[in-house]
Amino acid sequence: MTGPPRQRSDQPAPPDTRLETLLDEYEFSRITKRSVASVRRDRLLGQGCPYAKLGALVRYRPEDVKAYIERNLRAAH
């Protein structure tokens, strides 16, 4: 029996072709504990978290959501 050809160890590994899971505005709203209306208003005003517009769909990358939350941390006084 022969299996798939083996890769040589000196060859680079194939790139990871899986795309990350994107969050919709409802998931983003749930994570940030804000209303969907507030999230939509922020987008309209050009504020808030970066997002991708895919046709009529709005999607957020998890790393952008994390960075958005980190940018908005405030120290307690």
Image (cartoon, grey):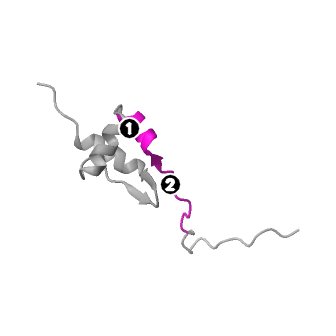
Q: What residue type is labelled 1?
A: Val
Image height of 27 relative to 46, above or below: above
Region in magenta: 15-32
Q: How far apart are marks 1 and 2 (CA)?
A: 23 Å
Image height of 40 relative to 10, above or below: above
Q: Residue at x 46, y 57 (%)?
A: 56
**Few, some or many residues within 10 Å of mark 1 (<14, 14–19, 20+):** some
Magenta residue check for 30:
yes
Q: Residue under circle 2? A: 20
Q: Residue under circle 1? A: 36
Query: How many circles with numbers are drawn on the protein?
Result: 2
Quadrant of the image occupied by residue 41: top left
Q: In this view, does 22 lie to the left or right of 35?
A: right
Image x and y of residue 18, in percent: 56, 60
Image x and y of residue 5, in percent: 74, 73
- Quarter holding the N terminus is bottom right
Image x and y of residue 10, in percent: 56, 74
Image x and y of residue 57, in percent: 46, 54
Q: What residue type is labelled 2?
A: Glu
Which residue is at the front of the view, 14 or 12?
14
Residue lying at the far left of the rendered structure? 77
Q: Residue at x 27, y 45 (%)?
A: 42
Q: Residue at x 43, y 52 (%)?
A: 59
Q: What element carries label 2?
A: loop
Q: Which residue is drawn at 70% across and 71% down?
A: 6
Quadrant of the image occupied by residue 8: bottom right
Which residue is at the front of the view, 44 or 65?
44
Image height of 7 relative to 18, above or below: below
**Few, some or many residues within 10 Å of mark 2 (<14, 14–19, 20+):** few
Q: What element carries label 1?
A: helix
